[in-house]
Amino acid sequence: MKRKILTQILVLLTIAVLVITGCATPTPREDKPIELRFTSGAPFFAGLGKVALAPWAKELEERSAAIGKPVKVTLYSLGSLAAFPDTYDAIIKGIADIGAPWGPSHFPGRMPLLEVLQLPMLFPSGIVASQVAQELYDTRPEIQEELKEAKLLFFCSSPPVVIHCKTRQIEILEDMEGMKITTRPGYTSFTVEKLGGVPVTITPPEAYQALERGVVDSVTMNWDGSMVFKYHEVTKYRTETPMSLYSDPLACSISIDTYNKLPQEVQEIIDEISGMPQSIIAGKAFDESCNEVKNTVMGIDKKAGNPPPYMITDDESQKWIEAITPLYDQWIEEVEAKGLPGRSIFEDVKRLTEKYSK
């Protein structure tokens, strides 16, 4: 009898424990972060990467964590995940989730309308070029169609390039005659030809050795990039122009598949920190970074006994503009032959450049 009573008591205690533990509020499980891979052919620890790209990723992490939908962005720079020219395709193919900076110069002819932003002597700064590119994308469906393979986040167009020369100082147009200059494919090469130079199409990392060995005489690169690739070590003379010889409409994009799989709240954060506001931040940051690097290079040049950077005069600049102006009509004719609105797009670029230059 006692054993039966004891058994009943144990059963009742077991039931009570199960009821109590079943009714207790479970400890919430910490959400596992959503992991995104961000590839960049440039470093995240310097220049554009440090002042614009990495801060964008950090803001995404902080704001997503604050709403309980944490995102972890892993940064891969200098080709550790994808080669610089392959950045855009790496996003499309799922090798990376986010990628920057990429531009149409990496695959000439694939985005013919966007290449208008590579035409010479159009932009005085990176911030102007970035705003023009963003508004052109926001308002022209034809540009959106060219960039539909990935979701555009923002532009980070390059500031005016500088001619870094090993052999002589360039002050007038005649100084360009016969000079072997590294360029990007397409209209940047055509620009060098119109100015009397000999374009040599090689990648930025290859240019250092080409300069060192005397294969080329000079390289065209913004101040920021010149420090990244250490061109100051193998060149002595630097020439600037009031309007850039060319500007790359560099951009940052995210995989459409990746974006669509994200929680709506995270998508909204990405939208809020991208677009025109971030294009302005990136363009301004790129300009400021280039100014800092310019001062650094000037200090290095002074110690080495090299001359300070030379800015061509306004009168001389007009000669350069006259020399490259035929490229505008050439570009318009080429894209209109493909059934695209070349002249309309070009006029928009001129109008927007005037708008944002103010």
Image (cartoon, helix red, strand yellow):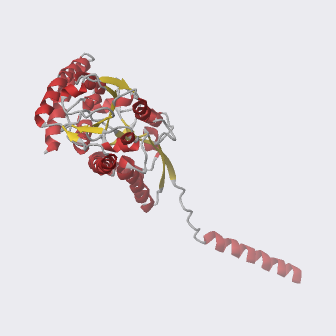
Residue 9 in the image: state x and y as whole percent: 78, 80
Which one is in front, 165 or 332?
A: 165
Residue pushed farthest top? 337
Q: Is 105 positioned to the left or the right of 140 in the image?
A: right
| Relative side of 248 to 320, left or right | right
Residue 212 in picture, x, y percent from top left? 42, 33
**In the image, farthest residue toward the left:** 315
Residue at 18% across / 27% down in the picture? Answer: 344
Query: 115 or 24: nearer the eye?
Result: 115
Q: Quadrant of residue 16?
A: bottom right
Q: Is residue 341 visible?
A: no
Q: Is residue 51 left or right of residue 313?
A: right
The quadrant in which the C terminus is found is: top left
Residue positioned most to the front = 305
Q: Give the total number of marks visible in the rendering.
A: 0
Q: Quadrant of residue 85?
A: top left
Horizontally, residue 18 falls left or right of residue 194, namely: right
| Coordinates of residue 152 in the picture (x, y in percent) | 35, 39
Please name whichever residue, 260 or 349, is drawn nearer the observer in this view of the structure. 349
Instruction: Give the quadrant of the N terminus.
Output: bottom right
Give the x, y percent position of residue 222.
31, 40
Can residue 299 be seen by looking at this rendering? yes
Residue plotted at (32% across, 49% down): 293
